Image (tube, coloured by chain):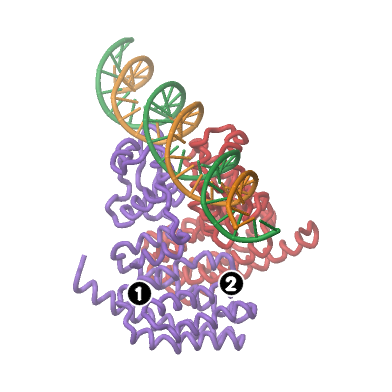
Chain colours: A purple, B red, C orange, D green
Amino acid sequence: MSELLYYDLKDAAGVVPSLATQVCRELGRRIVAGHLREGELIDDENRLCERFGVSKSVIREAVKLLVGKGMLEVRRGHGTRVRRRASWNLLDDDVLAWHQGFEPRSDFLRQLMDVRQVIEPNAAAWAARSATEAQIAAVRLAQANMEGALSVQGFVVADAQFHRAVLRAANNEVLMAMEGVIFSSLLSSIRLTNADPRDNKRSVPLHRKVLNAIEARDAEAASNAMKEHLEDTRARLAGALSARDTKGGH
Amino acid sequence: MSELLYYDLKDAAGVVPSLATQVCRELGRRIVAGHLREGELIDDENRLCERFGVSKSVIREAVKLLVGKGMLEVRRGHGTRVRRRASWNLLDDDVLAWHQGFEPRSDFLRQLMDVRQVIEPNAAAWAARSATEAQIAAVRLAQANMEGALSVQGFVVADAQFHRAVLRAANNEVLMAMEGVIFSSLLSSIRLTNADPRDNKRSVPLHRKVLNAIEARDAEAASNAMKEHLEDTRARLAGALSARDTKGGH
DNA sequence: ACTTATCATTCATCTGATGTTTAGATGCGC
DNA sequence: GCGCATCTAAACATCAGATGAATGATAAGT
């Protein structure tokens, strides 16, 4: 479901992705899931053609896409191998999305959360200082959507919308490019906690606190409110993770 | 020079990048430089073939690479257009590198610096808490290289090496994926201040302070030392920027 | 033992043909 | 003139097949 949600937002509705894109996604997912291991040579072009039932041009374009994301390394005359994880573009939206196609490693989720806890309070602070009225209105709207959400699905979308609006209001392009980190972490949390409606209820006032601080142009308060919210989120996530890891165990 | 430095580090030495990669870089640079404007349709495949003197497959692979970086949008039957800057993968190493092929906008450099100031003190703190001995040794080595650098070039490389080592020592994959932000900001600063050797001298003790704090496992001190260093860097950068903008003026 | 030649494998590029989609032009009935 | 179906040129998507160039392993020669 989570990946559906992701690509629903990304692909223009009703547009069928090209074959190259499809092959790229399939390979990307397999690599992220560890089915194709780091350092390993993957099938050669001809074999990939057979396996996917497409022509060589499609395969080559798909591979190029993955090379661009730092996941594959092609050497002429030798073959194509999976690069080590350290050189993947983990901040690429697709790469992040592929992490949700299976149960992500707990430590990766924690690392995502660590980075969010660094990034978002600052974003809130900057937003309090520099947001335009229109940008604040966007945050306000997202907040309203959360309060008025009728379904769990609707709540999740409004939640993502809220965090995105705050990030944009910070008026920092580099920060905005990290939207995917927040979105990915958020979706993972939702999935792991099974989107418990009680959790959602609880997080509404925390979001409102952030909004109020930004409206009041109080950077310090905005930062603290966001910190408080994220600590709450992290606690819930940690609970869900330990429940999963002691039970299902890899 | 800066781009040379970047690709020297990235491309395996002596390896000629494929035509598709070359075309991709050329198009990417033109887009980043604003020569191809956002929202604009670029030449169709045939025209690009003529212009670059390559076949259609090469063009298609190059375009796919840029699509993967969020810079182009291809619609079958219609054409290929430059996506708006907000959807570019600004954190992609190539995209960052292309920003150095021309004089970057001051506000972009400031935004990079803002993000560094958020990221790096935390990285230093995490490193102080969780770095392995080997990771600390890497930081120490970089520090030694800075102190013993014989050329300006050597100093810059050691400086980058230091910041990279700290980032890695933080043991957070997502953070590590942001290495490019730091590297890019660092190179821009160097270029703008013309790598003044006096500046370098001055920054040595600031780096040492960071190293010592990490060695002492003092997260608070590491964070503060890194903050101090970055504030110094920012001040120099701000000076160079205002000098440039009042003079050359865009 | 060391160097050189050969060879199969694999990626890189080119060529040209065919299918699909899109946007806009055309033409028709009203 | 307006609305609508149809047609068409432009542009991307995919395929098939051919040739070139780099690599690594193996075999041959010294």
Callout 2: SS: helix
- The residue lying toward the viewer, choosing from B14 and A169, is A169
Tell me if residue A211 can be seen: yes
User: Residue A112, position in %: x, y?
Assistant: 40, 69
The residue at 56%/68% (across/down) is B115
Point out the frontmost of discs 2 and 1.
Answer: 1
Please provide percent x and percent y for residue A108.
Answer: 35, 66
Can residue B143 be seen here? The reply is no
Residue that extends furthest to the right in the rendered view of this protein: B247
Quadrant where the image shows the C terminus of chain B:
bottom right
Disc 2 + disc 1, Cβ < 8 Å? no
Q: Where residue C30 sits in the image (x, y, percent)?
A: 60, 58
Discs 2 and 1 share one subunit: no
Chain of the residue where label 2 is placed in the rendered structure: B
Name the residue tied to disc 2: B228
Left or right, residue B122 beside residue A194? right
Relative placement, left or right, of A72 versus C7 is right
Residue name at image x 63 percent, y 52 percent: B40
Q: Quadrant of residue B110?
A: bottom right
Report the amino acid beneath label 2: Glu
As drawn, D7 above or below C6: below
Which residue does the image show at 40% across and 76% down from the upper left? A156
The crowd level at tag 2 (other Cα within 10 Å; few <14, some 14-19, many 20+) is some
Is A183 left, or right, of B158 in this rendering? left
Q: Mark 1 lies on which chain?
A: A
Q: What residue sits right under mark 1 in the picture?
A: A189
On residue B158, which mark appears?
none
Task: Look at label 1 and name its amino acid.
Answer: Ser
Query: Residue at point 64% right, 80% down?
Result: A133
Q: Which of A214 and A139 is in front in this view?
A: A139
